[in-house]
Every structure is written in C-alpha cells, then in structure tokens.
Image: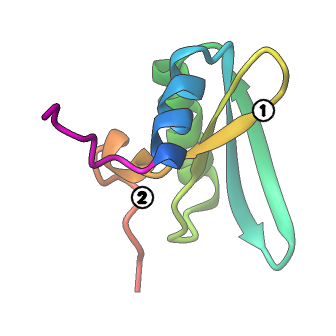
Amino acid sequence: MPARSTRDPVDNEAARLVARAVGFHVALSVGPGTYDYADAPSLRAAAVEASRLVSRYRNGRDPMIYAVDASGDMVLLTSAARLLGGACGSQD
C-alpha cells in the first residue's frame, strides 16, 4: 500500500503558489488599522525590505511576507520571522 501524504491539501496548494511566485509583498502593522508596505521581486529582497520596515518602526511587531503569483493570489509565509534571523522579536 503506498504511503499517504500527511500534509494538508491546503499546505500543498500554498507550497505550489510559493513555487510559482512572481513577487513578494511585505506588510508591517504600524498602528491600529495602519500598515506600511513594500514589494520585492524575490524572497531574499523581501527579507531585506522586511528588515528595513522593522528598523524604521521599531514597534516590536513582526512583518508579514506574502508570496504573490501572476494572477495576484497570495499566501502568507508563516516563517517570515525565522527568515529574518529573529531580528523582529517583540520588545516587551
């Protein structure tokens, strides 16, 4: 009997969207209902933009990085804080 995938079908679709991403969108909450944004052509460039936003606002919030495909569909990369090497940890 073949082994069954233990990954959730939603995770599989998210991984496919990341693989076909044409760009990345970065968002950082800077206040109640207010965000600053940046766009980047690659995940590495998105990490640089995220670090720039974190340095600018220094509010202890982690940036959100989304992969964007050609049709505009987006998926949140939930390990964005790890990608940045923990540079965004909360400042309690």
The percent coordinates of residue 77 (x first, y second) are 51, 44
Could you say which disc has been placed on residue 17 in the image? none
Q: Viewed as shown, does residue 51 lie left or right of 85?
A: right
The percent coordinates of residue 18 (x first, y second) are 54, 26
Q: How many labels does the image show?
A: 2
Residue in the picture at 30% in, 54% down = 86
Could you say which disc has been placed on residue 88 in the image? 2
The percent coordinates of residue 35 (x first, y second) are 80, 58
Question: 10 Å neighbourhood of mark 2: few (<14), some, or many (≥20)?
Answer: many
Residue in the picture at 67% in, 56% down = 28
Specify the quadrant of the image occupied by residue 84.
top left
In the image, what residue type sits under mark 1?
Asp
Q: Name the residue under label 1.
A: 73
Q: Viewed as shown, does residue 83 lie left or right of 27?
A: left
Q: Main secondary structure of the magenta part?
A: loop
Coloring scheme used: rainbow
Residue 14 painted magenta? no
Disc 1 element: loop
- In this picture, which residue range is highlighted in magenta? 1-8
The quarter in which the N terminus is drawn is top left
Which label lies toward us, 1 or 2?
A: 1
Disc 2 element: loop
Position of 49 relative to 44 (above/below): below
Q: For this rendering, which residue is in front, 6 or 17?
A: 6
The quarter in which the C terminus is drawn is bottom left
